[in-house]
Image (cartoon, helix red, strand yellow):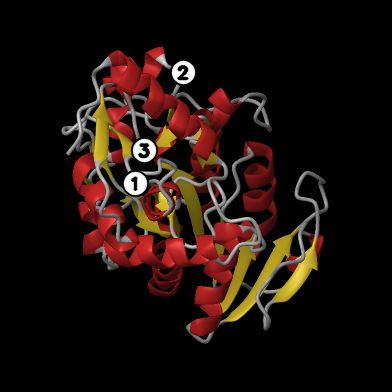
Amino acid sequence: MNLLILGGTAWLGRAIASAALDAGHSVTCVARGENVPEGVTLIRADRDTDDALAAVTSQHWDAIIDVARQPGQVRRAVSDLEPVADRYVFVSSGSAYADQGTIGQDEDAPRLPPLDADAIDTPDDYGSAKVACEDAVIAAFGADRSLIARAGLIGGPGDHTGRTGYWPWRFSHPAADDGTVLVPELPELPAALIDVRDLAAWLVACAVDGTTGVVNAGGIPIPLPDFLEIAREVAGHHGSLAPVSSGWLLDHGVNEWSGPRSLPLWLADRDWWGLNSRSNDRALAAGLRLRPLRETLADTLEWELAQAHPGPHGAGLTDAEERELLTALAADGSRPQR
């Protein structure tokens, strides 16, 4: 199979290129970076320029896989490549949905309005930008020659956002001398992630098989306490847990989901609980195979420990912040532990 990947040097794109090579395909990547797997043909180009894809429009492609987020890039790509490609696989996002509060929604849920602009202006544009990308792909290739894969939270080795690695890291490296770890107390909050390697292998298989339609590609949601227990077991943590309410965390300046001074995967606002709990039944029926969460977290912890500067990065609490919060909890006289 002659496969063209638009991207291929960043985390997911590189995983897709590796999966395609492992499956025995001929792989070409168009990207600004250089970090492609050995064996890939790299064409360096800036997709914000009108002639970025000129070098790949003179040959036939069995399939294209695109991980872009900028509508202008996708609009140019589908216009340039529709005449020379059999099908188009676009990696969209669950952020394309208008309702992020309802748990268990499927692919028929309403989307956000598409972004008119060619480029994202603020992070709030991300979901609408993905909708605009989806529309461009379907308008050019049609529903019978395209797959829209709306990815959920992607995790696994190489996750520089820190969302996958923080909890196994924290449980393996408690900041407190007695091994206590601060955790959010939200037993009903769903948590899920899809291993980047599983997503990449499935996208390549879909390109080969000609899978079409709109599909949610995410992990299987489980309660956040169960997720944390798996991370704890992977890390071999035997200390106490200090569960605290969302109100307490917000009052003490802890951020939700990701970023600095955060607790990854924690969502206090129930209007966002559907973000990480969408139905993936259609993807499973289309051949998506998910490895155990335990394996993903263990492999991610191993990757974290191999970094030049291991420890919380991109998301989570620093050791100093963790100790500060535990001290504040003890001072409140409200330090429940289990």
Q: Distance between the residues labelled 2 and 3?
A: 16 Å
In-front residue for pair 126/330? 330
Tell whether 31 sits left or right of 303.
right
Farthest-out residue, front: 177
In-front residue for pair 196/139? 196
Label 3 or label 1, whichever lies nearer to me, is 1
Is residue 89 visible from the viewing direction of this image? yes
Q: Residue 179 carries which label?
A: 1
Amino acid at the residue labelled 1? Gly
Quadrant of the drawing holding the C terminus: top left
Q: Name the residue under label 2.
A: 253
Is residue 58 visible from the viewing direction of this image? no
Q: Name the residue under label 3.
A: 265
> Residue 70, how many percent across, how many down?
64, 39
Q: Residue 287 carries which label?
A: none
Q: In this view, does 272 lie above or below 137?
A: above
Q: Which residue is drawn at 21% across and 42% down?
A: 225
Mark 2 / mark 3, whichever is N-terminal: 2
Q: Residues within 10 Å of mark 2 (few under 14, many from 20)?
A: few
Label 2 or label 1, whichever lies nearer to me, is 1
